[in-house]
Image: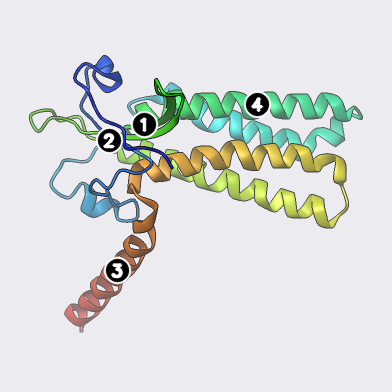
Amino acid sequence: MLQQEHLHPGGFSQQFGEGWRQQDSNDDTEDVALFDAEEETANRPRKSKIRHPVASFFHLFFRVSAIVVYLLCELFSTSFIACMVTIILLLSCDFWAVKNVTGRLMVGLRWWNHIDEDGKSHWVFESRKAPPQENNTVSEAESRIFWLGLVACPALWVIFAFSALFSFRVKWLAVVTMGVVLQGANLYGYVRCKVGSRKNLTSMATSYLGKQFLRQNTGDDQTS
């Protein structure tokens, strides 16, 4: 079992000059809704422009390139080794960029691991909390790009894995498994940053669906 991590002044979060809500894998702090972005920023101005175009580009570039190479490599090259190395390099670059750069810049989230003095591993999931006096909200356009790429690409690699398995393309299973693991790890890490404890995922999803149902019924009653 992982032990509760204690926050100390001048720690990792303060090195960036920003306010971050930090929790380790056993933290029971208040969750932030992932499924209802409208309620999350209801009292704050929202910005639709892309404030980090380079980060937004590379957030999609490596992962989309890996998928394109996987689909088309056999048309342009007969070397399986060359294709495999290219895809794994793209997946590795994507994992590093999304974990260390694009998540922090585009949505104000980050996750990481550290080893304490006792040699125990701690997984930390953080979300940035901007001071009330600062108008530094997350761009809606960047948030949509981030989550769309983060969710859609791992789903495609899962489809590729089943396709390779059922078509008996055994040599490609290692490649698609690497895609599922690396991109799935980032997806899991950022979902944990966003929603907090795993035990609250089901209740949050249920709450969101209930709110959407009530909102839809309210709208139908007003129109009638």
Q: Residue at x 48, y 44 (%)?
A: 188
Secondary structure under tag 1 reads helix
The circle drawn on residue 212 is 3
The circle drawn on residue 106 is 1
Q: CA distance from mark 1 to mark 4?
A: 20 Å
Q: CA distance from mark 4 to mark 3?
A: 38 Å
* Residue matched to label 2: 138
Q: Earlier in the sequence, mark 2 or mark 4?
A: 4
Q: Are marks 3 and 2 in contact (CB under 8 Å)?
A: no
Q: Earlier in the sequence, mark 2 or mark 1?
A: 1
Secondary structure under tag 2 reads loop
Q: Residue at x 20, y 29 (%)?
A: 136
Q: CA distance from mark 3 to mark 2?
A: 23 Å
Rate crowding at label 2 as few (under 14), some (14 to 19) or many (20 or more) other CA atoms within 10 Å.
many
Secondary structure under tag 3 reads helix
Residue that sits furthest to the left in the current view: 133
